[in-house]
Image: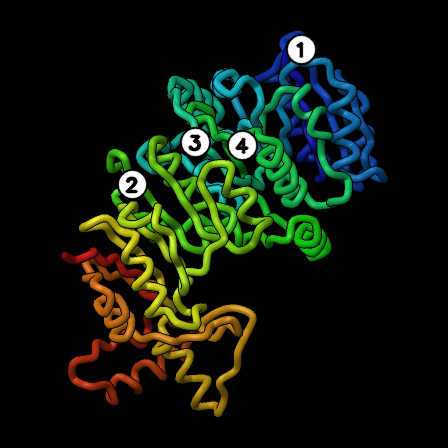
Amino acid sequence: MLTVLLLLTGDLQEARMMQAYLHENYPQGDCEKIFMYCGNDPAVLAFLEGESGTLFDGRNAGIAASCNAALRHAHGEDVLFLTAPYFLMPPAIRAMQRAAAAFDGAALIFPMLRESVGVGKEQELPAEQCADYQDVAGLRRFAESLSAEQGTSFVFASLDFCFFAKRQVLLEQGGFSEEFQSIPFLMLDLCLRFWKEGRFCVAAHGAFAHRNGITVAYGMRDADLFFRKYGIRYPYSFMPRMDLLQMVDVQKPELSVLEVGCACGATLLAVRNRNPNAELCGIEFDEQAAAFARRFAVVEALDVETLHKPLWHEKFDCIILGDVIEHLRDPWRAMKNLAALLKPNGHVVVSIPNVMHVSVFCMMFAGRWTYEEEGLLDRTHLRFFTLAESLALLRGVGLEPQQIARADLLDGERDQALFERLTDFLAPDVDPVELRTYQWLISAQKQG
């Protein structure tokens, strides 16, 4: 049996809408319905008390405690957690059940979405698969057609409060951590505990959830608590570098990839989703982050500036360095060491902040060179590069640039005005676009 656990935090209109949705798509007798109300409108509670199904008043207990009480009360072997913005048709449930069976039930199963909350991009449905539907009947037809999809993708962490699981598995995990108060960090914590215990978080390609507009409040209290518990920050340690993977032949047979500074391994996991047979390795000094990356990659704490790893000599097709080089004392030596790990004709893919960006000039014209917590003048940056110096660094160790892309940023009228004035002072061989480039993305091939 399926138990649908619906979390409500809003007004009476929201409650009526979700009631109608459940009655139409999950008729009485087909499943157990449990309502959890954690808002502050007594009228909603009075309305829900007249509903068929179980009601938990979580106004004082909080979201996590209310969800845990509902989970313990539930009778279904399968449970579907929903909150008001999400609409999941029965065909999607079948696809999620199929995905759960593929992992022996030991997984959190998430649906596909037009756009995910947070950095869980593996949940996003490809644009070519997104049908336009105008009403519930159209959504139902779309969900039915998509449900034939068989595949799954690993999701490192999802903030979307819309997932399927085996009730017993959730109970074994301890349900939701009641130390957290906001939904995003309840979900982050739950996902990380699944990974930590050798279980999985998975997006079912055949399951689609429609989501109305949603505003996500992270809450600084929970953010700080999350950092104290795990020693890692969201979203920084969870961001897959999809921009860099666009420069990688991810589908290459027998692909071997090394990521330097892999954090929790989100980029490596994105490679695994696209090439299940790829050999994945990482370098990461933060042991707490590395522990998660080791679920799907070989990860070691190595100093690339003194690197001596004979077993990795000419091992890799691709080495990824996302915003790493600028943090090194001797990036020239480090890149020489890493080049030795590439196979002949292998590639290194790097992203490097551009110190020539107009915002840096703007700061200097104000008489400052102020280090900050993040950005081009991050206080942990030890080296600074223009495009010419970035290319010289790579060529100096036998890596010939093949592709150059950029991330542009002009922040407001002041940056635009200064950009236009500075172009007059550039040398003839310098492209003005360098002034508006915030970051360089470069793929370079090993020569010889």
Identify residue type, mark 1: Gln
**Dot placed on the residue nearer the N-terminal end, 1 or 2:** 1
In the picture of the structure, the residue carrying the numbered disc 4 is 201
**Dot placed on the residue nearer the N-terminal end, 3 or 2:** 3
**Depth-wise, is mark 1 or mark 2 nearer the camera?**
2
Question: Considering the numbered disc 4 on the image, is that residue within a helix, a strand or a loop?
Answer: strand
In the picture of the structure, the residue carrying the numbered disc 3 is 153
Q: Crowdedness of circle 3 by 10 Å Cα count: few (<14), some, many (20+)?
A: many
Question: Where residue 410 sits: x, y (%)?
Answer: 38, 72
Give the spatial CA distance, label 3 vs label 4: 9 Å
Question: Where residue 286 sits: x, y (%)?
Answer: 56, 54
Q: Nearer the viewer, residue 325 or 374?
A: 325
**Dot placed on the residue nearer the N-terminal end, 1 or 3:** 1
The vertical placement of 94 against 342, above or below, is above
Give the spatial CA distance, label 2 vs label 4: 22 Å
In the picture of the structure, the residue carrying the numbered disc 2 is 250
